[in-house]
Image (tube, helix red, strand yellow):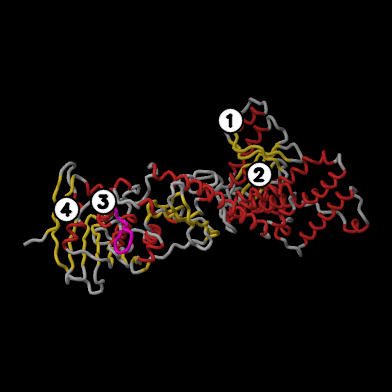
Amino acid sequence: MSRLFHMTILGRTIEHLGSQMYKHRAPSIAELVANCWDAGATTVWITMPVEGDYDPAGSAVTIRDNGEGMNENSVQTHYLVVGRNRRADDGGISHARKVMGRKGIGKLAGFGLAEKVTVTTWTPDVGKAIRFSMSIQQLKNDAGQSQNIEFPWEDADKDPNWSLSGTCIELSDLRHASPIDIAMLKETLARRFSRTTRGQMRILINEEELPDPVIESMYSYPEDGSLKTEILPNSQTIKYRYSYAEKPIRSKEMQGFVIYTNERTAQAPPFFFNVESTASGQHSTRYVTGEIYADYLDAGTDNESDVISTDRQELDWEKQELKELLEWGQEITRRIFRECADKRGQQFENWVLNDNRFRPRISLIDPSSQAQLKNFLKILGNKSTENDERTLYLADSLVRAYEFRTFHDVIDEIEEAGKDPDKLEEMLRRLHDWKVLESRAILEIVQGRLSIVNKLEQMIIHNAPETASAKTHDNLHDLLAEYPWLFNPEWQVFTEEKTISKQLREWGETDCLEDMKDKRIDFLAFAHDTDHLIIIELKRPGHPVEMAELQRLEKYQVELMRSRKNCRRVLVYGGTVNIPEEKWNEIISGELFEALEWSQMFTRAKRFYSHYQAVLEGDIIAPGFRGKEIEVARTREILETGSSHRSKEDRGRGVGSSDV
């Protein structure tokens, strides 16, 4: 005689309550773990396939407990009754615990992960276990149709390593192509069940016990880690605690509040009572974590009093009975956001003000600007952590902005300060500070220019292309267009890639040879010391100069001389030519032509700025550093005394540096 269990379902009930209600794997597993709690389990073993061994068709997920187990009668009359409200039967207490289940559909959560659910359950008084399987295909039915489904069951041997009683749920024919992230699953389960639950029921995943979430806190309330009790206007009691993390909390599971009822989640994290879009909350959400216990939300036994979603992801905040909790939560969340922002801002401000990289510089800024700077440091602290590269850059940029602001303030106030002796005295003190700041600005520019010179050298060495191409965007033309002083610091480059006809029109000339109208010149410049127009053409390093190129450059010169009589041409090339030596010597000896090698251009530009290298590197024993030190001292003396008169010692040093 066959032994069968029966389940009666209507339409697509199982599909809606199983695979549709529990779309995410972690909440589905949490629902099955809650069933273990209601069965009186003290330990739950979860076995998950790992990434390298995962196969949707061959892998399985198991959830096994050491709870009371089920016999044939309890399987039929309790477990397979969909929608059974057990709280109406036992008052919501089982095994001296508050029951977590309420709607009687948690057993279907396995269909959120798998096509097939196999149940093995056993009790101490029976030598064998009961085993049966349910398939989602069995349970599917057309809308509006009722169906009586039979589940054949059989006796099964109990694993000798298993507890005296318990239940094992095996999920197979898995629905997802990739394995679940086990680390994320641990975080989810640790947040879905309170510390009390995890203290009374151990949860192990692949033989490793579920750890408590660890967050390095900057501040916790209450400070001893206990729970703060609050009485709402509706006389209901809630308890809570929260913390501010030292660093941004990366896991969404750990951000924000989780609301527990009867030690299990009723509102999943991250939750901020819908005030996270406020100004103070935009960045604080990454640092705030907390727990709220509101058991009264799940105290009822009837379905009408239920305010928790079936998958226990959220509360129905539209219901009137949640109004007081929502208003309290919004008020305290706003306060926590403000506190978090203030504490983080103060911590960041203290760090900057006491850091040796910033303290000496800030001390040179006037008190009024320092006060403003400190306020901005507090704001910056809302989204920055100490001593990382990004924070150092932001803090340096903020301090630098006030350094330059001090420079401009000095210039703007000179005229006004001169009318009052006291103000003038103050201005002179600030002028001393300004020299320091001006020096920093100049050295920053020089250091940048030396870096660009080195960039040019590397491009020459690696035979960089003249213009951008499909292979690389890095090219010599763009570098020179951005930094034209590389050609010669004495030239004023004013245009690039302009046709000869357009340039002549701008100068009021309309005549131009037809075959020259659309010819483009790489660069045009004027020499600072003369009114000479300089035509600059580039030749890629590593490619020899051809005679035709020189002739074309000469034609450019002839056309432009229609408007500018003093006009000479410059060819920047790699140092090799494909022209007879006698002819080449004849060409380069002309007054209106200059052949400038890339290496010569690099050397000239570097020499122009390299005398500042010792200052930039702080090499106090280098001759260059000593020379600049003498210059600064002499400049300060002239400005302070108002006289350029040189002493006998000054004359003995000879003339000052011309920096050429």
Q: Is the C-beta separation of discs 4 and 1 under 8 Å?
A: no
Instruction: Report the disc number at residue 169.
Output: none
- Label 1 Cα neighbours within 10 Å, binned few <14 / some 14-19 / many ≥20: some
For marks 1 and 3, give the CA distance.
77 Å
Residue kind at label 2, given as amino acid type = Pro
Tell me residue 389's x, y (percent): 58, 56
Task: Name the residue rendered at 18%, 51% in the picture.
Answer: 139
Q: Nearer the viewer, mark 3 or mark 2?
A: 3
Looking at marks 2 and 1 on the same chain, the residue that comes earlier in the sequence is marked by 2
Q: Which residues are magenta?
A: 93-104
- In the image, taking residue 169 as reference, residue 495 lies left or right, namely right
Tell me residue 51's x, y (percent): 33, 62
For marks 2 and 1, give the CA distance.
25 Å
Residue kind at label 1, given as amino acid type = Lys
| Residue indicated by mark 2 | 484
Q: Nearer the viewer, residue 80 or 254?
A: 80
For marks 3 and 2, give the CA distance.
70 Å
| Residue indicated by mark 1 | 517
| Residue indicated by mark 3 | 18
Q: Nearer the viewer, residue 324 or 311?
A: 324
Residue 577 vertical placement versus 505 (above, below): below
Q: Is the C-beta separation of discs 2 and 1 under 8 Å?
A: no
